[in-house]
Amino acid sequence: MRIAEVIGTVTLSRCHPSIAGYRWIIGVPFSLNALTNSIPPDGEDLVILDQLGAGQHQTIGVSEGVEAAMPFYPNKKPIDAYCACLIDTISVN
């Protein structure tokens, strides 16, 4: 799981029938350096399926790869990133 900040939303004109009606957001992952030094996220943008209602500039936890599709098991969904949690605070030691 990676930690990311929401920077926008995505509007699809066409999509696979199994993911029709879902909400999509754009997130930028934090590197360890960005988390420890309280600087803005510095990763590569991701398009993320969101069922939790993450808002603009909110910090989220993102599951990727096979784990991103696990909330829909046994159904198969063609997704690569899933908003798994909304994060209130981060403490890095």
Image (cartoon, rainbow, N blue to C red):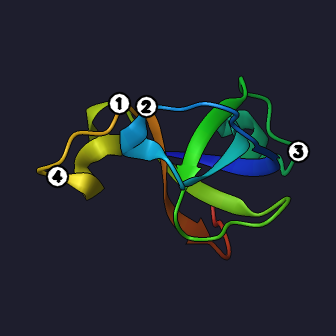
Most extreme residue toward the left, as rendered? 74
Residue drawn where x is 76% and y is 51% of the image: 6
**Residue 57 pos. (x, y %):** 85, 59
Residue type beneath disc 2 = Asp
Residue type beneath disc 1 = Gly
Question: Left or right of 20: which side holds 4?
Answer: right
**Residue 8 pos. (x, y %):** 83, 47
**Cβ–Cβ below 8 Å for labels 2 and 4?**
no
Residue identifier under label 2: 80
Question: Left or right of 77: which side holds 21?
Answer: right
State which tag comes first along the sequence, 2 or 4: 4
Q: CA distance from mark 3 to mark 4?
A: 36 Å
Q: Which mark is residue 73?
A: 4
**Cβ–Cβ below 8 Å for labels 3 and 2?**
no
Determine whether 12 is above or below 63 in the image.
above
Q: Residues within 10 Å of mark 3 (few under 14, many from 20)?
A: few
Residue nearer the viewer, 44 or 25: 25
State which tag comes first along the sequence, 2 or 1: 1
Residue type beneath disc 4 = Tyr
**Residue 46 pos. (x, y %):** 65, 31
Residue type beneath disc 3 = Ile
Q: Residues within 10 Å of mark 4 (few under 14, many from 20)?
A: few
> Can residue 92 be seen?
yes
Residue drawn where x is 69% and y is 36% of the image: 12
Residue identifier under label 3: 39
